[in-house]
Image (cartoon, helix red, strand yellow):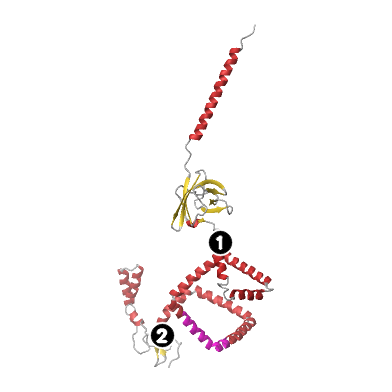
Amino acid sequence: MRKPTTPIRLGQRVRLLRRTALVAALALVATLTVVLWPSPEPVRVTAYFPRTVGIYPGSDVRVLGVRIGEVLEIEPEGERVRVVLAYDAERKVPAQAKAAIINSSVVSDRYVQLLPVYRKGPALRGGDVIPQSRTAAPVELDRVFDSLHTTAEALGPRGANKEGSLARLLGVSADSLEGQGADLHTTVEDLSKAVTTLSDGRGDLFGTVRNLQVFTAVLAKDDKSVRSFNTSLRKVADQLAGERKDLAAALKHLGVALADVTEFVRDNKKALTDDVKGLTKVTKVLVTQQDALAEILDTAPTGLGNLQNAYNASSGTLDTRNNASETAQDPAALLCSLLGTTGERRDAECEELKKLFDSLPELTRQRGGSGLASTDRTLGGILEAA
């Protein structure tokens, strides 16, 4: 007996229809979302041109020839024209972009070209302005024709060539330049290279001129000092000019003297070496004894003064004062004072010393006799007696 298959096929068809309806509904929703979703507002910028011949509202705004927007408004303002441009917000244009009116042919419509192409960095935003310094418009044919007509009249029979002056100039120039084409070409080429070199080094040239300007300003500020320096320099130059013979003679003698010195040094090299070595030893001794030398230099003036005071010009002798008798008057007191400086002094010991010296015979105190008080004018035989 067969199984029923019709109910199963109907269920599959129902499910398939439901899936198809669901996919169609989703596609319709996506389409409506794309169509009805609000798109971002176009970017509106203002550009100022010197003139806008051939540009109208609705003209293309392009980048590299690709249309990205259109011209919205054109309004003259004095000697310039204000043009409002709008382009898609998805497109980016550099913030420092330039605008130019381009005509691809003589008779075709013109469009506004924005350049350069955006790479990175800030971009134009709505409300930004492209000033006239960054816009350009093509020269019209009528202006070219007017310029050519004006030039032709200026050079024609009623202008520069009214009396044939221009014709004579051209004739003389042709005669003068005949056969000099190669030289003229070389001159122009060399001039071009020179101008190129100056252009490449314009930074250094401008820096040199700027430094020269600073130097000149400093000289102008110190004009009085500069004038005084120039005057002094002139006086020195005049003095040197007046003594140039003496300078020449001095230089000549100096050359001779240097030759003699060279010969002397060469002949006496060994002796000079020994002298320098000896001088080195003397110098070392002086360095070693510098404290003693300093002490001698400090005490020498006093000693020389005492020596001068001790010299007796009438007798030709050095007179000294002998105080031995005064010291011998109280030798016990002298010894007690010495003991006091060492911290060993005692009154009992001083009394014993006094008794000891009192028991000794009294010293002879003759004045002018042959005793201790007599004067030895020869200082022990060092000097000759008068």
Task: Say the numbered circle drawn on residue 255.
Answer: none
Region rendered in magenta? 229-250
Residue at image position (40%, 92%) is 313
Q: Is label 1 in contact with label 2 (beta carbons under 8 Å)? A: no
At which x and y percent is residue 237?
Answer: 51, 84
Quarter of the image that includes the N terminus:
top right
Percent of width and height locating residue 80: 46, 57
Give the camera-side residue of 90 and 136: 136
Within-10-Å neighbours for mark 2: few <14, some 14–19, many 20+: few
Residue 180 placed where, x, y %? 68, 73
Q: Is residue 255 above or below residue 80?
A: below
Label ID, residue 307: 2
Tell me the amino acid under the disc marked 1: Val
Work out which quarter of the rendered image holds the C terminus and state it.
Answer: bottom left
Q: Nearer the viewer, residue 185 or 334?
A: 185
- The rendered magenta stretch, by its main secondary structure, is classed as helix
Task: Specify the amino acid type for callout 2.
Answer: Leu
Location of residue 249 by image quarter: bottom right
In the rendered image, which residue does mark 1 sit on?
A: 144
User: Which residue ends up furthest to the right in the rendered image?
Assistant: 179
Numbered disc 1: secondary structure: helix
Q: Secondary structure at mark 2?
A: helix
Please give the name of the residue rendered at 48% of the width and 73% of the height, measured from the top-left corner: 216
Which badge, 1 or 2, is on the more N-terminal residue?
1
Callout count: 2
